[in-house]
Amino acid sequence: MKKISALLAALFCTLALAGCSSNYVMHTNDGRTLVSEGKPQVDDETGMISYKDANGNQQQINRNEVKEMAESQ
């Protein structure tokens, strides 16, 4: 019984944490749509936006190439 309770508690925590991270959508000037896992980080010194793509790879794009960035609904 304790194992089932522990498993359910772990499952609940995992789902609760997964619900906290939002995806962001970036629309570029050339018409591409980029989806980021979590909020992209903007480096003011370099002008680059760093984000993790749908495959989990770290990517960067120049801030001047991004027309719009919004949290995905």
Image (cartoon, rainbow, N blue to C red):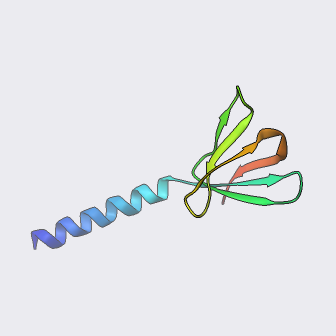
Image quadrant in which the N terminus is located:
bottom left
Identify the residue at horizontal 31%, vertical 66% (top origin): 11
25 sits left or right of 5 in the view: right
The residue closer to the viewer here, 46 or 44, is 46
Q: Is residue 6 left or right of residue 64?
A: left
Q: Is residue 29 left or right of residue 38?
A: right
| Residue farthest along the left direction in this orientation | 1
Q: Looking at the image, which residue is at 18% across and 68% down?
A: 5
Numbered label tally: 0
Foreground of the two, 9 or 67: 67
Q: Is residue 39 above or below residue 43?
A: below
Residue located farthest toward the top when viewing the structure as drawn:
45
Residue 7 vertical placement versus 53 (above, below): below
Q: Quadrant of residue 15?
A: bottom left
Q: Residue 24, image x and y in percent?
A: 66, 53
Image: 45 above or below 58: above
User: Image point 80% across, 48% down: which residue?
Assistant: 68
Residue 17 location (% of width, % of height):
41, 55
Q: Residue at x 83, y 52 (%)?
A: 28
Give the answer, above or below, for where 3 lies relative to 38. below
